[in-house]
Image (cartoon, rainbow, N blue to C red):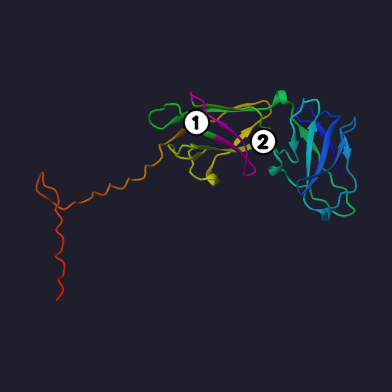
């Protein structure tokens, strides 16, 4: 397997990036990129399992990512290997200083009052990759997401507000995607409706035998049988 790692913004090759290969989520081997940004990993067995790549910068200048543009291993794209074939897997890393921001405010339908404690989850490739909780002003901010396409889900752990996908959708399949550009600032507000209240069952009344006021119930013993 071979590839070239470059700066997503300038296209310049990146030296010293560590490229790690994982098979079925288990670390196998790691190599550094050369001055021209290239790397080579030899001896990978296509039959060993599903291969993933992770790109990390020891200096902390560039955001860690999984191939291809994944934030976490769960959303990584497996690299397809074939016997006696060289597979190319290039990567473009984003400087931490140029990561996009995603923010917004969650308010109540009708009153427009801010809602605190709403969990805002960002999904990439169908899986949740990060979560934020709205503050007292109903605001949230993501600042560590990679450029790319996401979907957002707004949910209330307390169950007082109806779950919603952006924008105003009850189902994930109908959610509007949020596209984050390099260095961009995207705003995604939401308005939630109160959760439907389940009807409470009426309390059962206990019926007592009627008796005259101030009178206690009297018990009369049955007469004993006499011997003949």
Asked whether, in this view, residue 30 is left or right of residue 155, the answer is right
Secondary structure of the residue carrying tag 1 is: loop
Q: Indicate left or right for 86 with 178 as reference.
A: right
The residue at the far left in this view is 212
> Marks 1 and 2: CB-CB under 8 Å?
no
Can you identify the residue that label 2 sits on? Answer: 148
57 up-or-down from 47: above or below: above
Nearest to the eye among marks 1 and 2: give it. Answer: 1
Q: Residues within 10 Å of mark 1 (few under 14, many from 20)?
A: some
Counting from the top left corner in percent of width and height, residue 219 is at: 15, 56
Element on which disc 2 rests:
strand
Magenta span: predominant SS is strand
On the image, which quarter does residue 179 sit in? top right
Q: Earlier in the sequence, mark 1 or mark 2?
A: 1
Query: How far across and down, in percent of the image, does residue 142 sit?
Result: 61, 29
Q: Residues within 10 Å of mark 2 (few under 14, many from 20)?
A: some
Asked if the magenta segment contains residue 121, the reply would be yes
Image point (36%, 45%), residue name: 198
- Classify residue 58 by image quadrant: top right
What is the span of residues highlighted in magenta in the rendered image? 120-137
| Front position in the image: 99 or 213 | 213
- Residue in the image at 88% along x and 51% along y: 85
Residue corresponding to mark 1 = 117
| Quadrant where the N terminus is found in the figure | top right
Residue 85 relative to residue 181: left or right: right
């Amino acid at each position: 397997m071979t590839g070239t790692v470059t700066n997503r913004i300038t296209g310049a090759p990146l030296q010293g990036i560590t490229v790690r290969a994982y098979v079925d989520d288990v670390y196998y081997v790691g190599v550094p990129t050369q001055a021209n940004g290239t790397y080579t990993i030899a001896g990978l067995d296509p039959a060993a399992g599903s291969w993933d790549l992770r790109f990390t910068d020891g200096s902390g200048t560039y955001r860690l990512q999984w191939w291809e543009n994944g934030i976490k291993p769960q959303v990584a794209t497996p690299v397809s290997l074939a016997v006696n074939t060289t597979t190319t897997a290039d990567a473009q890393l984003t400087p931490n200083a140029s990561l996009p921001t995603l923010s917004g405010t969650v308010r109540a339908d009708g009153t427009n009052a801010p809602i605190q404690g709403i969990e805002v989850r960002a999904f990439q490739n169908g899986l949740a990759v990060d979560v934020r909780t709205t503050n007292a002003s109903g605001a949230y901010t993501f600042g560590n997401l990679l450029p790319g396409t996401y979907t957002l889900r707004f949910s209330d752990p307390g169950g007082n507000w109806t779950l919603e996908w952006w924008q105003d959708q009850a189902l994930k399949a109908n959610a509007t995607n949020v596209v984050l550009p390099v260095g961009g600032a995207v705003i995604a507000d939401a308005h939630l409706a109160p959760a439907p209240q389940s009807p409470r069952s009426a309390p059962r009344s206990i019926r007592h035998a009627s008796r005259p006021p101030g009178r206690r119930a009297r018990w009369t013993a049955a007469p004993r049988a006499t011997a003949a």
